[in-house]
Image: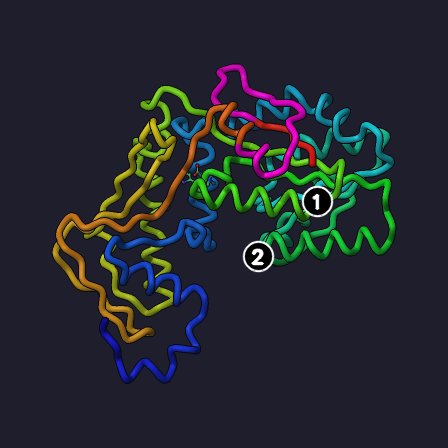
Amino acid sequence: MTSSTLNSESTNQFSTFEKDILEGLEATQKKLSSKYFYDEDGSKIFQIIMNLPEYYLTRCEYEIFESYKENLYEQFSKGTQTFNLIELGAGDGLKTQVLLSNFVNQNTPFSYLPIDISGEALHQLKVRFNKTIPSLNFEGLEGEYFEALAQLKTKNNLSEKKNTRNIVLFLGSNIGNFGDQQSLNFLTKLAQNLNQDDYLLLGFDLKKHPKIIKMAYNDANGITKAFNLNLLKRINRELDGNFNIEKFDFYSTYVPETGEVRSYIVSEAKQEVSLKKLNKTIKFEWGETIHTEISRKYSANQMKEITKEAGFEFVESYTDCKGYFMDMLLRV
Ligand code: AVJ
């Protein structure tokens, strides 16, 4: 254990970001959480990724929504007077727009409630939907997923809106970033935060030929590499670091047994990096890795089992014509 007297004074002032980054870089197996990829530049790079020929996920889910928007509307509106579409981590909302612009022309009134920790992201989404779907009832909720959900639950109970069904959208294989235990915990907590007859529409990537999966995270133009290395740039900027981006590489591999794509930043030299703001120096061996991301793939049956264990009942599943991606509709 190293301790720095200089720092002990300010230790309790570290932000969550600072603590997470430092803890990750001081661990034996270094790690940085992929949730920190999405600063302004990172979000832009992710937009590019979603359009890459290798990255099939977004296109497949888009196709599913185009093909099944009517069917989804029927499921969502059946037996309720109104519904809330609550999206966790909405991003740019392009895929969701397919559903929303169809639903506004139907009979059952509904509200769209995206939850995001970034107020700015919510604002941009609101501006966008104001133009594209002016009649949409939009109510952004700023905060952590479960705080916002809990708020919503009490609000609905208080106003006794018993005829409003809550439908949570967790799309785009975002669940893939969780480890197995973490996703079970997440889904369990989600089920507990919903009322009976509420729904979850869960988008996840299916297991398939390992080469196809591997290529989605090893694109020819190195955009995924840039996406990962951007986190080092963010650390340089926010923690006054001196990562030399040129001296780091990217490595990503898929393991069929676990269904996990695991991604890493690799040090291409024996080197030291200082984080001035935290008064810390991090040492790297040649070839040493920083684990950055898990992108978990599931079979349909695996997901049925996990969601059942979490307290959900299977309703229906939808897939694209290649059978690459799946959206599963579940009920509490
Ligand atoms: C946004 C988490 C679904 O894991 O496929 C894309 C992020 N990482 N390329 C994924 C990502 C590298 C993506 N998710």
Is 22 rendered above or below residue 303? below
Q: Residue at x 45, y 66 (%)?
A: 16
Residue 309: x and y in percent read: 57, 35
Q: Which residue is mark 2?
A: 118
Q: Is residue 134 visible?
A: no
Q: Residue at x 82, y 41 (%)?
A: 164
Viewed as shown, does residue 89 lie left or right of 166? left
Circle 2: element type: loop
Residue tagged by mark 1? 194
* Residue 99 falls in image quadrant: top right
Q: Is residue 263 left or right of residue 159?
A: left
Q: Residue at 36% across / 62% down in the picture?
A: 21
The reply to whether the magenta stretch includes residue 4 is no
Ligand 1's image quarter is top left
Q: Picture coordinates of residue 193 (x, y %)?
A: 68, 48
Residue span colored magenta: 306-326
